[in-house]
Image (cartoon, rainbow, N blue to C red):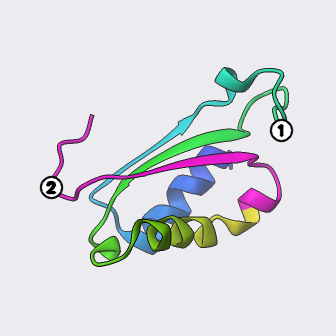
């Protein structure tokens, strides 16, 4: 399973998001630290979920990073997290 597929599956299972977009941005980081041939090193996660209601931004990001701990310790070098409003709009 690709890193992107793993990230999507773990976040969907943990947070039941109403919107989830996982974007491989590795190509934007060619030659930078952590970049590897074949990509799957730098990701952006855009997520909207009721699970984050009442949580601070820091707590939201920690929750995502906790779920993806194994990937962050292994093959994912960087992760950008955007928590979006549950009611949209999402673009």
Residue 23: x and y in percent read: 52, 37
3 horizontally vs 49: left or right: right
The reply to whether the magenta stretch includes residue 54 is no
Left or right relative to 62: residue 60: left
Say which residue label 2 marks. 87
Which of disc 1 and disc 2 is earlier in sequence? 1
Within-10-Å neighbours for mark 1: few <14, some 14–19, many 20+: some
Q: Is residue 32 above or below residue 7?
A: above
Q: Please tell me which residue is depicted at 39% across the width and 72% down the height of the picture.
A: 56
Magenta stretch encompasses residue 83: yes
Q: Residue at x 73, y 58 (%)?
A: 71
* Mark identifier at residue 34: 1
Quarter of the figure with residue 42: top right
Q: In the figure, residue 91 lies in which quadrant? A: top left
Q: Count the marks.
A: 2
Q: Is residue 27 above or below residue 10?
A: above
Mark number displayed over residue 57: none
Magenta span: 71-91
Q: Nearer the viewer, residue 58 or 27?
A: 58
Neighbor class of circle 2 (other Cα within 10 Å; few <14, some 14-19, many 20+) is few
Quick check: 11 above or below 52? above
């Amino acid at each position: 399973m690709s890193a992107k597929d793993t990230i999507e599956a773990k976040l969907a299972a943990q947070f039941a998001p109403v919107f989830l977009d996982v974007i491989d941005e590795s190509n934007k980081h060619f030659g930078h630290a952590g970049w590897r041939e074949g990509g799957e090193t730098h990701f952006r996660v855009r997520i909207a979920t009721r699970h984050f209601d009442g949580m601070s931004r820091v707590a939201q990001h920690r929750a995502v990073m906790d779920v993806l701990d194994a990937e962050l310790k292994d093959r994912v070098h960087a992760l950008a997290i955007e928590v979006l409003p549950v009611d949209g709009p999402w673009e």
